[in-house]
Amino acid sequence: MSHVPRLPAHPLSGAAAAPASIPSYLQADNLGPWGIYLQQVDRVVPYLGHLARWAETLRRPKRILIVDVPIHMDDGSVAHFEGYRVQHNTSRGPGKGGVRFHQDVTLSEVMALAAWMSIKNAAVNVPYGGAKGGIRVDPKTLSLGELERMTRRYTSEIGIIIGPTKDIPAPDVNTNEQIMAWMMDTYSMNEGATATGVVTGKPVALGGSLGRRDATGRGVFTVGSEAARHIGLDIATARVTVQGFGNVGGVSARLFAQAGARVVAVQDHGGTIFREAGLDVPALLAHVAAVGTVAGFAPAEVLPNDQFWDVDCDILIPAALELQITEHNAGRIQARMVIEGANGPTTPAADDILHERNILVLPDVIANAGGVTVSYFEWVQDFSSFFWSEDDINARLVRIMKEAFAGIWEVAQDHKVSLRTATFIVGCKRILQARELRGLYP
């Protein structure tokens, strides 16, 4: 019987180099996002029981598409951008995951994000697999016309693997409702029929869902409130710090402030601001909408970016990019609870440090699942052409998030593991059970 070698742990842990038979893009040869995901899978395998025989499924993306995206620039030149779409697993349903436009996008990152989407969708039990896409570009350097041409060409290039029943993109870093509208239109034109369900996060006028814009932040607040109740933390008196003040961080901050919490520090690409008495979150949101960053907001004290991690708080919400909390700053964090609004913000080494310091980490694969949950609602509404009220959507979201968190909390208590490992236990078991039941074809 042939045997596919198990991918090794990260080389920094002392493991041997990966066998030559393992493609280089699957090797955990640096502590990038994919290497972190592989370590997370390694930690959960002992809890999978008989399903562990299928664990290699989790370590290998189902499909990787790398595309060239050439476009005409406004000055008459032709520019080429590299784009990706990765489908990690589709055993439970079509691929689902966002598209990001960022100058630091890499294949390792997109692979890991797709894999985390697989776990996330299974953890909240929506009938999706995991996928992710991206283009390596700084969209701020493009005109509106160039951005549209790039989006449409990318959509045409990945059109061979996406579709309402195959793989459904959504907004992510530096993408929004307008990008989704261009993607939907491009796919529809190529198909010869309007296909609203090919993407989610669309404008409401094109089949988008009410409540989608706030959904990820609302999910962060919901699971944060549930976890706070379990550890005896009163949200109404809590001090909150937020890294990243876009759609996720901004909405999370607003909801925590509305519940009485003091948001004392916020960091984004423009800098770090602090106010002991608490920042005026609605005014800060208006400031960011006007100037694009928290920098320059008054009244607030400016802090060096590195001092953000030293701010005394009860709740820390990393809602920016991956790999923000590492072994170098985890020992400085003062929070009782970390709620991961971003994908992959904490390295495994930092996870261990936070656990040893009795800081509860609410992992991304449950904490920020509100967005994909409401994306599922949008997809269902598009298929039925029947749309729900925002109150109904928010109520359904809160119910699903609370039920998912309760189940994960129970698994964590039963196995005496972290909430991240517990979420992976729940998600991986559901994925691998589907894989086992479907079998292999041919």
Image: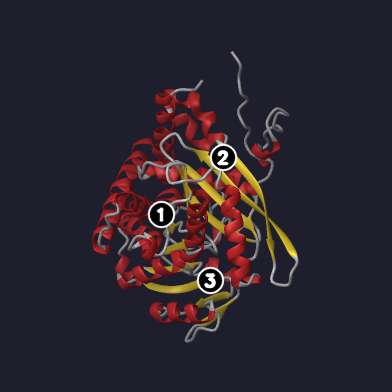
Which of the labelled discs sits on residue 39, or is there none?
Answer: 2
Residue annotated with mark 1: 196
Q: Which numbered disc, 3 or 2, marks the residue that appears first in the sequence?
A: 2
Q: Toward which corner of the image does residue 104 lie, by quadrant?
A: bottom right
User: Looking at this rendering, what residue extends furthest in the right direction?
Assistant: 77
Q: Is residue 314 left or right of residue 136?
A: left
The amino acid beneath tag 2 is Gln
Residue annotated with mark 3: 267
The amino acid beneath tag 3 is Gln
Could you say which is closer to the camera, residue 237 or residue 266?
266
User: Looking at this rendering, what residue extends furthest in the front direction?
Assistant: 192
Could you say which is closer to the camera, residue 10 or residue 429?
429
Q: Residue at x 40, y 29 (%)?
A: 433
Q: Residue at x 68, y 36 (%)?
A: 14
What is the distance, in whole Å, between disc 1 and disc 3 at their CAs? 36 Å
Mark whose residue sits in front, 1 or 3 = 1
The percent coordinates of residue 55 (x first, y second) are 51, 29
